[in-house]
Each structure stands twice: as structure tokens, then as C-alpha cells.
Image: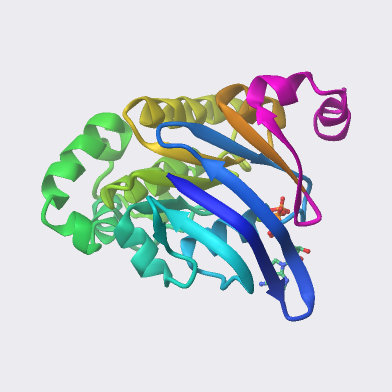
Amino acid sequence: MLRVEDLELYYGDAQALDRVTLDVPAGEIVAIVGANGAGKSSLIRAIAGIERARAGHIRFKGRDITQMESHQTCDLGIGQVAEGRQIFPSLSVAENLEMGAMLARARAKARETMDEVFTLFPRLAERKGQLAGTMSGGEQQMLSIARCLMGQPELIMFDEPSLGLAPTVVQEVLHTIRLLNRRGITILLVEQNVAVSLKLSQHAYVLENGRVVMSGSGEQLLQDDRVRQAYMGL
Ligand SMILES: Nc1ncnc2c1ncn2[C@@H]1O[C@H](COP(=O)(O)OP(=O)(O)OP(=O)(O)O)[C@@H](O)[C@H]1O
Ligand SMILES: [Mg+2]
């Protein structure tokens, strides 16, 4: 579904991604693992069209999206749940969801999609009039996932979805990701909890200093001594 080939990204003279190549097959959960500053968020932002690659290619469903703007990638079906839950705090839950359905691909079905989203997240239905900024961290994370769903994505890229959440809420978020995947949404997951993200994923890539240094099935990487030492403290 998504293919990244020899992608290079720079911030000024500083290289953030160095010939990154990876595949995200339709229907799978693919994890990106790496230390702080490895380039994980940069990779997601490059795919989303927020950062511009200097070299390489990004293809989505066979189409070259390397030079596309973010609104174009969204309209093709690439959704993003960004780091730090970018909701609109002074808008209500329902208004936040409506914002997620502004895309051409989603507008006509917005009402229907909102019903589906409320079925998936009953807590959001209970709180549709509440200002988003007054919700708990976990509820805000659910809202940002729900808002992404309003755009009817085929691929969702998650950047550290469990950051700063209590363990029970983390479980809820991971459960939601698995559920969305079972419903046919392809997932690219960046998650600080390496053990969990490797368990969840069919394939995983290890990013170090902007380079892919290892890849394999989640299971394989989970057994790998280097991965266990470097990222799981084992
Ligand atoms: N807007 C920017 N301008 C300049 N340098 C940046 C910018 N964004 C990221 N970088 C640099 O690019 C490198 C990769 O950053 P990135 O945020 O992609 O890492 P990351 O793997 O997501 O890290 P973390 O786990 O801390 O979120 C870092 O050295 C970072 O300082
Ligand atoms: Mg990051």
C-alpha cells in the first residue's frame, strides 16, 4: 500500500533521513522503532507531505506522492494521529470531529461516519458538547484518533499514541489500534513502548540516526539480542 524508497530528508544541512526504504503492505500493522532523534516523526511527516524530501520516492497505492502537500495525501486516504494530540481545545468534541470530515473524500458521509465513530467511542458520544481541552489525556487521545477516522483513512500513521498516558489507557489505545486494523485499516505505528509495538506489528523497522539498520517480523525483532538490549533494556 505504501512504499518508501531511498528517502532523504534534511533540515538545513542536518540530515534526518538517510536512504530510508520500507514497505507497508495493505492490511498490516508496521512498526517503526528507534531512539529519540532517530527520525521516526520526520519519516511520518515526510510521508504526510508536511516535510519535503530531498531525494527518494514515496508511493501510495501505486501513485507517486513524494511532492504532494499534506491536504492531498489526506484526501488520498492517508490519516495521521500526530504526536501530542493535536485537537482544537476550545472546540467541542463534535466540532473537532466535524473538522476531521472537511476532506473532500469524507464530507458527504460525515454524519454517517460520526455515528460509527460514536459507536466505537461511546465516551465521546457522552461528551459531544464538552470542550475538547477539558477532557482527560486519554479522552483527548481517543478524540484525536476519532477525528482522524472522520477523514475515512485507509492508512493511519500513529506517532507515539501512548505518550504520557496511564497504563490502562495505553492498553485501551492499543486495543483500538488493533480493532481498527481488523476492520481493514492499514497502520504505520511509531511507539515508544518497543515490546508492545513489536508484539502488535507484523513487520517492523529499526531506525538509527535516520537509517534503517534492521527489519523483520515483529516476532523476529522481539527475539533479537541487539533490539532487546538497545530498546527494551533486557
Ligand atoms: N523542524 C526541525 N528542524 C530542525 N531539525 C529537526 C526538526 N525536526 C526534527 N529535527 C531533527 O531531526 C532529527 C530527527 O528528529 P525526529 O523528531 O524525526 O526524531 P524522532 O525519532 O521522532 O524522535 P523522538 O523519539 O524524540 O520523537 C533530530 O535530530 C531532530 O533534532
Ligand atoms: Mg518523534
Q: Position of residue 188 (x, y in %)?
A: 52, 42
Dividing the picture into quadrants, the one containing residue 233 is: top right
Dividing the picture into quadrants, the one containing residue 126 is: top left
Which of 49/57 is in front?
Answer: 57
68 relative position to 206: left or right: left
Q: Is residue 83 in sight in this rendering?
A: no
Q: Residue at x 75, y 57 (%)?
A: 210
Q: Residue at x 79, y 73 (%)?
A: 14
178 relative position to 146: left or right: right
Q: Residue at x 36, y 36 (%)?
A: 185
Which of 230/169 is in front?
Answer: 230
Q: Position of residue 48 (x, y in %)?
A: 48, 61
Number of labels in the image equals 0
Q: Residue at x 33, y 50 (%)?
A: 147
49 relative position to 213: left or right: left
> Considering the image in quadrants, where does the C terminus appear?
top right
Colouring method of the image: rainbow
Q: Name above or below for residue 172 compared with residue 189.
A: above
Provide the residue span drawn in magenta.
208-234
Q: Position of residue 201 (x, y in %)?
A: 57, 28
Q: Is residue 87 in sight in this rendering?
A: yes
Dividing the picture into quadrants, the one containing residue 1 is: top left
Q: Name above or below for residue 81 compared with residue 24.
A: below
